[in-house]
Image (cartoon, helix red, strand yellow):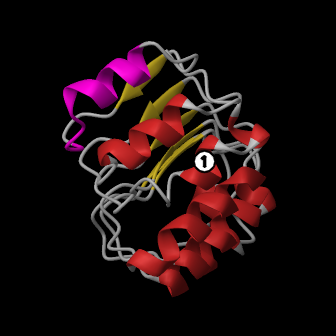
Amino acid sequence: MAGSPHLSNLRALRLSGNRITNAGAIALAESQTLSGDIRELDISGNMIHRDGMRAVAQSPIFAKVESLDIGYNALPDDQVADMLSELRHLRSLQELHCKLTSIDGERVAPLANSPEFASLKILDLEVNLLRQGGAAVLAQSKYLRPHALNIGVNLIGPDDMRTILHAPIC
């Protein structure tokens, strides 16, 4: 697919639930036929780990991506923070959807503490493991100021929710 000449005019590429692995993500990132004008990329529900995410994030083909969905990729726990850190290369990113990606308090730090994510308007962290540690990290972020924040189904208690609601992130 990555070599098809019919893909040169794409602005949105939705590949969710296709069992794409790191090799497939790397092939997409190195494609000679995809243009660098893709604004929306949905690679959720696949089997893409750190190396595949790194290739996508650093590829000139995806440099203009504004909306990225990486949810439901079965990332090994030790790769989640690295994967989020790699996404800082996507300078045009405005929407980030990370449902069910094992993001907890420690792993959300690269996202919350990086000025490269200050332009995010939509941050979707639904169905993760934020709990109180993640709530505190988000609340203390100097950079995140999304217009929409989804932190549903994260086992965040009432005190942590108050912390977030009174923090600059909201």
Residue 152 horizontal side relative to residue 125, left or right: left
* Residue sitting nearer the eye, 137 or 108: 137
Q: Quadrant of residue 81?
A: bottom right
Give the prevailing secondary structure in the magenta stretch.
helix
Amino acid, disc 1? Leu
Residue at the farthest bottom position: 23
Residue for point 32% across, 30% down: 160
- Number of marks present in the image shown: 1
Q: Would you say 76 lies left or right of 26 here?
A: left
Q: Residue at x 32, y 34 (%)?
A: 151
Task: Kindly state the secondary structure of the residue where label 1 is placed.
Answer: helix
Left or right: 127 in relation to 82: left
Span highlighted in magenta in the image: 154-165
Q: Residue 150 placed where, x, y %?
A: 34, 30
* Residue 3 visible (yes or no): no
Using the image as rendered, state which of residue 149 and residue 21 is in the foreground. Answer: 149
Q: Position of residue 92 (x, y in %)?
A: 74, 36
- Name the residue tied to disc 1: 111
* Viewer-nearest residue: 59 or 156: 156
**Horizontal and vertical percent for residue 107?**
50, 60
Residue 48 vertical position relative to residue 130 in the rendered view, above or below: below
Count residues near mark 1 (Cα–Cα under 10 Å), then give few for <14, some for 14-19, many for 20+: many
Residue at the location (66% across, 38% down)? 93
Q: Residue at x 34, y 48 (%)?
A: 130
Considering only vertical position in the picture, is 130 above or below 158? Answer: below
Does the segment drawn in magenta span residue 114? no
Residue 33 percent location from the top left of the image: 70, 65
Q: Is residue 150 visible?
A: yes
